[in-house]
Image: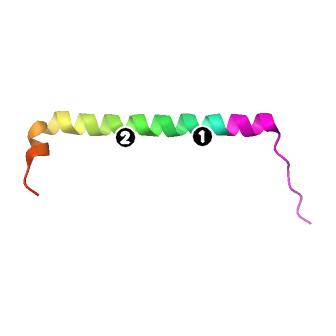
Amino acid sequence: MIETVEITEAEKKARKSRSVAIAVALAVLVGAFYAITVLKLGSAVLNRPL
């Protein structure tokens, strides 16, 4: 028989805030990689023909 564990409201709130913190950290990391790439390659990389 499978037993399920009920999550309390405090645990739900903690899980949600942890998820938001991870999402924000990931977005900051992506933005930093983008900014570093543009700085290293120069702004001319944005003006290239497609």
Residue 22, image x, y percentages: 54, 38
Q: Are marks 1 and 2 in contact (CB under 8 Å)?
A: no
Answer with the quarter of the image where residue 47 lies: top left
- For the N terminus, give its image quadrant: bottom right
Which element is circle 2 on? helix
Residue 24, image x, y percentages: 49, 35
Q: In the current view of this chain or complex, which residue is farthest to the bottom?
A: 1
What's the residue type where badge 2 is placed?
Val
Image point (19%, 38%), residue name: 38
Any magenta on residue 3? yes
Q: Is residue 26 left or right of residue 48?
A: right
Q: Is residue 22 left or right of residue 4?
A: left
What's the residue type where badge 1 is placed?
Ser
- For the C terminus, give its image quadrant: bottom left
Q: Residues within 10 Å of mark 2 (few under 14, many from 20)?
A: few
Q: Residues within 10 Å of mark 1 (few under 14, many from 20)?
A: few
**Real-space Cα distance between discs 1 and 2?**
17 Å
Mark on residue 30? 2
Q: Is residue 32 left or right of residue 41?
A: right
Query: Does 12 sit above or below residue 50?
Result: above
Q: Which residue is mark 1?
A: 19
Which element is circle 1 on? helix
Q: Is residue 46 left or right of residue 5?
A: left
In the image, which residues are magenta?
Answer: 1-15
Colouring rule applied to residues: rainbow
**Of marks 1 and 2, which one's residue comes earlier in the chain?**
1
Answer with the quarter of the image where residue 35 lies: top left
Image point (62%, 36%), residue name: 18
Residue 10, image x, y percentages: 78, 33
Any magenta on residue 5? yes
